[in-house]
Image (cartoon, rainbow, N blue to C red):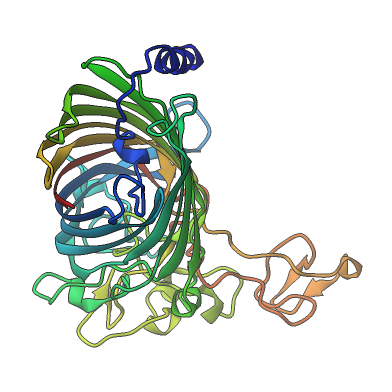
């Protein structure tokens, strides 16, 4: 990879031509108050994006294999599907030399997710509808959620406000690459997505799509045009990160959003360009790698899993009848049900393990005239398998001098070194977000074979 990038760089310097050229689209910023163009550049974009996600859900399950000791093995459970259709509105304005202001707003026209049994699983499922899922003789075998199930969401999303600045541009000086900094703020402008929102159920008006976070999105990009006669190459690379901060309401819900980091490399293959008429035709090929850290956030199953709160149970470890008591859950709504419980809605945030997303994109950039650009393409992404439910049972807060001391909630064991319903200080050390049915090792849920397919098209008015 380094050799290719170095080759692009050397070729870009050695094949320089006198005429100016635009930076690659991902690193391009608009300008204003230039000597040859004093008026600001303006781009108004109306776009459409269709996204489809498919995943398989498996579960760790303790079982005995012939001739071997019991072990936690992954068993098939669910098929997960999600799709959305989004209208994208964006305005970019040059406010100074190679400095732009941009504002974007997504509107989710329709969005849905669903779960259903994997083939041949229904009679053996550990989630719903079998003895594996419902066995009073086994404390944690209380049904999780009805299967199949569906949720629908739509509405105005979270807006993006930001600046882009290119202190160096090869358009002005061929000795340098184009260097672009972007600083964006994604504001919680959309109706917040609530996992327990009954409007998201089939027949409802649709749940919210906002994340309920203020996200600081920072990135740096660079490209160097290999000038000369077309066809030509314009390779680029970008690094970025997102630093999310949950709103007060989301923090009360337990949200701890993960930090993400991304790297993208690609090139525009310029087939034809005519500066005199502003015609420009190119193909854009890119690859992106994104890291998502561990955090308590929305998962594929957060709309479907029960919101059990173990801190409402006096004993250290819940038993079957505790899961059957609606008072041990964090929410209630008339006419709802989760598992076998009436009046308790499904839905809670989950502590999702870290994972990687890989995405390849093919795009066409068509500019037949000065005032209009059409850009569209397709992306195919793959996500590494990861745990969807990995909440910690709690935190042992007993002081060191409590060694050999027995706790009020369990007089048979020492306080220090374990999580107690009531420790040596009279405190509950358990997490209210931990559900032993699916957060305990040997019962956790995992997503595998995750594939994302995205189609997008943007019509851009350019001034």
213 relative position to 119: left or right: right
Q: Is residue 269 above or below residue 313?
A: above
- State which quadrant residue 276 falls in: top left
Residue pictured at 23% horizontal, 80% vertical: 336
372 relative position to 406: left or right: left
Furthest toward the right, the residue is 401
Q: Nearer the viewer, residue 101 or 117?
A: 101
Residue pictured at 49% horizontal, 48% vertical: 241
Q: Is residue 148 visible?
A: no
- State which quadrant residue 262 falls in: top left
Q: Is residue 160 visible?
A: yes
Q: Is residue 289 above or below residue 350?
A: above
Question: Looking at the picture, how far across and down is residue 265, in whole percent?
Answer: 39, 29
Question: Looking at the picture, how far across and down is residue 411, in whole percent?
Answer: 75, 73
Q: Is residue 226 above or below residue 293?
A: above
Q: Is residue 444 above or below residue 310?
A: above
Residue pictured at 33% horizontal, 84% vertical: 332
Residue pictured at 40% horizontal, 48% vertical: 98
Report how many numbered discs are placed on residues in the image: 0
Question: Looking at the picture, how far across and down is residue 78, in whole percent?
Answer: 25, 47
Q: Nearer the viewer, residue 222 or 257?
A: 222
Q: Nearer the viewer, residue 294 or 43?
A: 43
């Amino acid at each position: 990879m380094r050799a290719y990038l170095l080759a692009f760089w050397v070729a870009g310097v050695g094949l320089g031509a006198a005429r100016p050229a635009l930076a690659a689209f991902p690193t391009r910023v608009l300008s204003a108050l230039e000597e040859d163009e004093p008026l600001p550049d303006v781009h108004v974009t109306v776009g459409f994006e269709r996204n489809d996600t498919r995943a398989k859900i498996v579960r760790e399950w303790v079982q005995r294999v012939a001739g071997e000791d019991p072990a936690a093995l992954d068993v098939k459970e669910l098929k997960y599907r999600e799709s959305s259709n989004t209208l994208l509105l964006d305005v970019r304005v040059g406010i100074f030399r190679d400095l732009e202001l941009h504002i974007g707003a997504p509107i989710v026209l329709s969005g849905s997710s669903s779960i259903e049994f994997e083939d041949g699983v229904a009679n053996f499922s550990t989630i719903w509808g079998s003895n594996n899922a419902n066995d009073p003789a086994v404390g944690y075998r209380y049904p999780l959620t009805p299967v199949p199930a569906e949720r629908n969401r739509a509405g105005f999303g979270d807006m993006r406000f930001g600046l882009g600045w290119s202190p160096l541009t090869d358009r002005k000086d061929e000795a340098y690459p184009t260097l672009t900094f972007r600083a964006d703020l994604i504001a919680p402008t959309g109706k917040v997505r609530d996992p327990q929102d009954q409007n998201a159920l089939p027949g409802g008006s649709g749940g919210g799509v906002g994340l309920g976070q203020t996200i600081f999105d920072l990135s740096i990009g660079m490209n160097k045009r290999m000038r000369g006669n077309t066809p030509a190459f314009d390779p680029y690379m970008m690094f970025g990160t997102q630093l999310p901060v949950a709103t007060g309401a989301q923090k009360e819900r337990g949200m701890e959003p993960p930090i993400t980091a991304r790297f993208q490399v690609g090139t525009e293959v310029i087939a034809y360009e005519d500066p005199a008429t502003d015609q420009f035709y190119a193909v854009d090929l890119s690859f992106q790698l994104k890291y998502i850290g561990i955090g308590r956030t929305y998962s594929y199953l957060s709309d479907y899993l029960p919101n059990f709160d173990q801190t409402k149970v006096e004993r250290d470890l819940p038993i079957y009848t505790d899961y059957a008591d609606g008072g041990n859950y964090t929410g209630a709504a008339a006419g709802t049900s989760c598992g076998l419980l009436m009046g308790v809605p499904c839905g809670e945030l989950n502590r999702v393990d870290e994972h990687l997303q890989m995405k390849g994109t093919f795009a066409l950039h068509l500019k037949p005239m000065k005032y209009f650009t059409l850009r569209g393409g397709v992306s195919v992404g793959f996500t590494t398998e990861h745990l969807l439910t990995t909440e910690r049972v709690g935190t042992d807060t007993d002081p060191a001098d409590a060694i050999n001391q027995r706790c009020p909630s369990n007089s048979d064991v020492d306080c220090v070194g374990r999580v107690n319903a009531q420790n040596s200080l009279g405190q509950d050390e358990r997490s209210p977000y931990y559900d032993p049915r699916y957060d305990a090792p040997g019962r956790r849920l995992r997503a595998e074979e995750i594939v994302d397919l995205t189609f997008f098209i943007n019509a851009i008015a350019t001034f």
